[in-house]
Amino acid sequence: MSVMHRFQRMRRRRRWQQWRPFLWVLIVACLVEVALHASQFHVPVPPIELDTPFYTSCQEPPTTPPEYPRENAAIVMLARNEEVDKASRAVRSIEQRFNRWFQYPIVFLNDEPWDEEFVHILNTSTSAPTSFEIVPKEEWTFPSWMDTQAARASIQSQGKQGILYAGKETYHHMCRFFSGNFYKIEALKKYKWYWRLEPDVEFSCSITYDPFVEMARHKKVYGFTISLWEEQQTCPSLFRKVSDWKESQGIPNSDLWKAGVDASWVPWPFRSLMSWFSHRDKSGDRWNLCHYWSNFEIADLDFFRSHRYQSLYQYLEKAGGFYYERWGDAAVHSLAVNMLAEPHQVHHFADIGYRHDWYYQCPANAPGGQLPESQALNKVQGSWAREISGGVGCRCECDGRQNRNHASYCLNKLKAPNTAHRPWSTWLESFIF
């Protein structure tokens, strides 16, 4: 090696040695800044469990009609005439497991006139009062200001891309309806609470208490059973729109909101560049896509009728994402609940056995809590799945050894603000997903 080459190497080494302390300081500063930023989304651990099942064993069902005051509530099903068999199965299931004792009215909604056959079959599927309503035409169509030709072209394009249900115009109408004006239609104006019931769902445990009464007593506004990831392609701009509205209203980050956001690990000032990607706010932080599966929800209608929620809906409506994308009502509800409700106002019905499509939740039966002497319960069923220590279910027929057939990540994330004992795997999975 020539003297000149040795001299150049020594000069480069000296430069590196001169710059090395500065680079280490820069690296440490970036790590500290990123850690401080991430700490803003830390969800504190409560000293006790803040959301436990209302009951952890069977209760003696009430006389029919119940002797105690009920809540002003209804079970609500949106269905079509051709779904008569699926609708009937769902109504028979909730009748057997709950409504035979509590007799809450069932409101059926359709965007078309009802067939006499549907009305007859559904009336014979329940002992509760029923009403069959038609959704107002203006609530089941494109907004008046929208270019319908462009919206239909977008829907067709989404369908060709294989985005789930996005090629069906009626599905977009349904998502818009449940996200916005569903809560204000004439048929539901007189009710404060509702239980959403979908065609072709199944309840596998007896519900021997009144969830409406318990929700009101514990000052809850929203209840769910299953939590999943949203399909990424359906709503790439939704989180940005909601977070922009949140900032414009000066709404601080609640612990529920933090549970739904994964802080960006890109250091300032480059973090904001991440906002160009989908599912991120303008600071570059990412929605983890976890949402409450809204095909089952028991909720306070006044929450959705509130000025703040309706203001958010009108903002989203004008953005056009219910048609130019396929914003789902589950995602809209979830982001709104996480933003506007307090953690203690959200309840996970861990004791309700529920199946919709392929996904299910199956509680284990509570040991010694199945009331084998109950005549009212024995009329429904005389046998049930094995009782397991820690179980909270009432006469569940499903096998509680497998509590659910889907990942528990989103459930653990969204329950974190109310959970004192969190599985460590949720923290690890945050980095993976």
Image: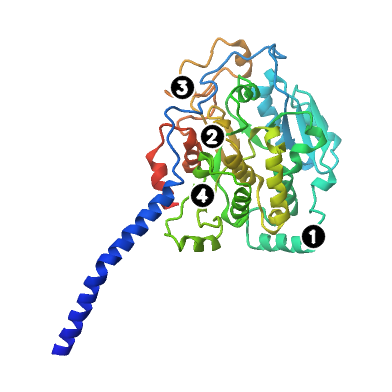
Residue, x 44% and y 60% (percent of image)?
268
Alpha carbon of mark 4 to alpha carbon of mark 1: how far?
32 Å
Q: Position of residue 271 (x, y in %)?
A: 47, 60
Q: Quadrant of the N terminus?
A: bottom left
Q: Which mark is residue 343?
A: 2
Residue mark closest to the camera, 1 vs 2: 2
- Residue type indicated by callout 3: Glu
Residue mark closest to the camera, 4 vs 2: 2
Alpha carbon of mark 1 to alpha carbon of mark 2: how far?
39 Å
Alpha carbon of mark 4 to alpha carbon of mark 2: how far?
18 Å
Looking at the image, do the residues carrying marks 1 and 3 touch, with CB atoms under 8 Å apart? no
- Residue type indicated by callout 1: Thr
Residue, x 36% and y 59% (percent of image)?
30
- Residue type indicated by callout 4: Asn
- Mark 4 or mark 1: name the one nearer the start of the chain: 1
- Residue type indicated by callout 2: Pro
- Mark 1 or mark 2: name the one nearer the start of the chain: 1
Alpha carbon of mark 4 to alpha carbon of mark 3: how far?
35 Å
Looking at the image, do the residues carrying marks 2 and 3 touch, with CB atoms under 8 Å apart? no
Q: Which residue is mark 3?
A: 387
Q: Which residue is mark 4?
A: 288
Residue mark closest to the camera, 4 vs 3: 4
Tell me the SS state at disc 3: loop
- Looking at the picture, the colour scheme in use is rainbow
Residue, x 67% and y 60% (percent of image)?
158
Tell me the SS state at disc 1: helix
Q: Is residue 146 left or right of residue 86?
A: right
Disc 3 crowd, CA 10 A, few/some/many (<14, 14-19, 20+):
many
Alpha carbon of mark 1 to alpha carbon of mark 3: how far?
55 Å
Q: Is 254 situated above or below 96?
A: below
